[in-house]
C-alpha cells in the first residue's frame, strides 16, 4: 500500500485500509532481515521485529474471534517458537488480514460485541461497559497495530539504521528523490534473508 490509504467515503473501507496501512508498517520492518536479526533485541526493550509480528497476529485474530462470536485467544504474548520464522509470520499476517476482511464484510459496524467477563477485570478496560461496537474494535485494532508498528520502527532502526519511510519506499518501488532514498542494504546482510512483498 502507498504511504497513505486510498481516499474513500465508505467507513468500512476506510477502517480496513487504515488497519492495512499499519500492518504494512510492521511487515516492512522485517524487510531483508535474517532470522537472527528479526529475533534480536537491539534496544532497551525486550521486543524484536519477529515478536511484534507474532503478537500482532494473535491479537488481531483474538479480536476478530470476538466479533465472530467466538472466544478471545488465550495466548497473545510475544514469545517465539522455532516455527515462528519471518516467512511464516508474514504468511500468517496475510492470512489474518484476509480473515479479518471476510468477517468485517458481513458484520455491521454498529453490531454489539459482548465484553468477555475476564476482560472486565483488566484495568485498561472500563468494567462498566457490557459491549463494544465492531467499529470500536476496529479503531482499537488500528490503535494497537500502530503502536506496535512504531515499536518495530525503533527496533529495526536499532538493528541496521533502516527507517520506516526508506523501507516503505523500497517495498513500494518508489523512485529515489532528493528527499527520500529507498532502502538498500549497505552490504550483504548474510544468508537466509526474507524479502517483504506487498500483501495480496
Image: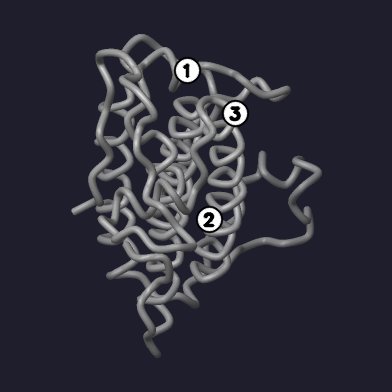
Residue 176, how many percent across, how many down?
Answer: 34, 58
Nearer-the-camera pick, 57 or 6: 6
User: In this orientation, which residue lies closer to the viewer: 77 or 65?
Assistant: 77
**Any mark on residue 141, and which?**
2
Q: Quadrant of the N terminus?
A: bottom left
Is 25 situated above or below 180? above
Identify the residue under disc 3.
158
* Label 1 or label 3, whichever comes before in sequence order: 1
Depicted 93 relative to depicted 78: above or below = below
Indicate which disc residue 39 carries: 1
Q: What element carries label 3?
A: helix
Give the mark, 2 or 3, whose residue is nearer the N terminus: 2
Q: Farthest left residue?
A: 200
Residues at discs 2 and 3 in contact (Cβ within 8 Å): no
Label 2: state its secondary structure.
helix
Q: What element carries label 1?
A: helix
Residue found at x 44% / y 30%: 54
Amino acid at each position: 500500500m502507498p504511504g497513505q490509504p486510498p481516499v474513500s467515503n465508505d467507513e468500512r473501507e476506510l477502517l480496513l485500509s487504515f488497519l492495512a496501512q499499519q500492518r504494512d508498517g510492521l511487515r516492512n520492518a522485517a524487510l531483508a532481515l535474517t532470522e537472527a536479526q528479526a529475533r534480536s533485541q537491539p534496544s532497551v526493550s525486550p521486543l524484536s521485529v519477529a515478536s511484534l509480528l507474532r503478537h500482532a497476529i494473535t491479537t488481531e485474530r483474538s479480536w476478530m474471534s470476538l466479533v465472530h462470536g467466538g472466544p478471545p485467544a488465550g495466548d497473545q504474548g510475544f514469545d517465539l517458537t522455532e516455527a515462528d520464522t519471518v516467512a511464516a509470520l508474514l504468511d500468517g499476517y496475510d492470512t489474518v488480514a484476509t480473515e479479518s476482511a471476510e468477517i468485517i464484510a458481513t458484520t455491521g459496524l454498529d453490531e454489539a460485541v459482548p465484553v468477555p467477563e475476564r476482560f472486565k477485570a483488566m484495568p485498561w478496560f472500563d468494567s462498566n461497559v457490557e459491549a463494544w461496537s465492531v467499529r470500536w474494535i476496529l479503531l482499537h485494532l488500528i490503535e494497537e497495530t500502530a503502536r506496535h508498528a512504531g515499536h518495530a520502527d525503533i527496533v529495526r532502526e536499532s538493528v541496521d539504521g533502516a527507517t520506516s519511510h526508506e523501507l516503505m519506499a523500497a517495498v513500494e518501488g518508489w523512485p529515489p528523490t532528493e528527499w527520500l532514498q529507498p532502502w538498500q542494504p549497505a552490504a550483504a546482510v548474510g544468508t537466509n534473508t526474507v524479502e517483504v512483498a506487498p500483501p495480496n
